[in-house]
Image (cartoon, rainbow, N blue to C red):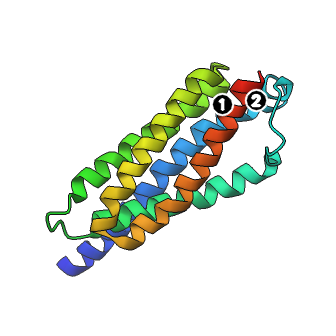
């Protein structure tokens, strides 16, 4: 009976992590979507800007990977590798992620959003560096997210430059 509780608890943590990252996604989407055809459409964008339809599927995949990575670190034994620190950095980077859309789209402040996304990049590097010792797969699961945020930083910077 106790073993069943442990198994259920493991899966409940994964569900909770998925709920948290998708809550961040939902808040961002609710702020972003109304601005796409108005304010955002009027901005000059770089030639390498992907079509709008790319963002939803990419972010969905990345959010699942992020949640699974955090879950794997949560499951990992803390053998002096700083599992707790990794999860704290995960929470920091997720908070910065959650701030970006309200600032960029909600406040219509690309310059301030650029500062936030640069901080997000730094927090992501710290998160990955903390995840790798706890669980290598978790660390690798975060690398595509880092690459996408680096690309998003370049887009954000280009929008600031062009406008």
User: Is residue 8 shown left or right of residue 56?
Assistant: left
Q: Secondary structure at mark 1?
A: helix
Residue 71 location, x and y as percent?
37, 64
Q: Is residue 153 left or right of residue 75?
A: right
Confirm or deny contact between disc 1 and disc 2 (CB under 8 A): yes
Q: 151 or 38, which lies in front?
A: 151
Give the percent coordinates (x, y) of residue 163: 77, 21
Which one is nearer the viewer's eye here, 73 or 43? 43
Q: How many numbered circles are shown? A: 2
81 versus 34 height, above or below: below
Q: Residue at x 41, y 50 (%)?
A: 125
Q: Does 106 appear above or below 70?
A: above
Q: Nearer the viewer, residue 17 or 104?
A: 104
Question: Helix, strand or loop at disc 2?
Answer: helix
**Cα distance, mark 1 to mark 2?**
6 Å
Image quarter for residue 84?
A: bottom left
Looking at the rendered structure, which numbered label has been put on residue 31? 1
Identify the residue position indicated by label 2 in the image: 34
Quarter holding the N terminus is bottom left
């Amino acid at each position: 009976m106790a073993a069943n509780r442990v198994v259920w608890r493991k899966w409940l943590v994964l569900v909770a992590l998925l709920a948290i990252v998708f809550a961040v996604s939902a808040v961002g989407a609710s702020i972003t979507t109304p601005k796409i055809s108005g304010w955002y459409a009027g901005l000059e964008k770089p030639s390498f800007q992907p079509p709008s339809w790319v963002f939803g599927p990419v972010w969905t995949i990345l959010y699942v990977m992020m949640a699974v990575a955090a879950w794997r670190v949560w499951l990992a034994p803390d053998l002096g590798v700083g599992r707790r620190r990794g999860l704290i950095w995960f929470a920091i980077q997720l908070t910065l992620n959650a701030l970006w859309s309200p600032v960029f789209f909600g406040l219509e402040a690309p310059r301030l959003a650029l500062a936030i996304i640069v901080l997000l990049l730094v927090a992501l590097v710290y998160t990955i560096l903390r995840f790798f010792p706890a669980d290598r797969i978790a660390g690798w699961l975060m690398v595509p997210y880092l690459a996408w945020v680096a690309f998003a930083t370049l887009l954000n910077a280009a929008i600031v430059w062009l406008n």
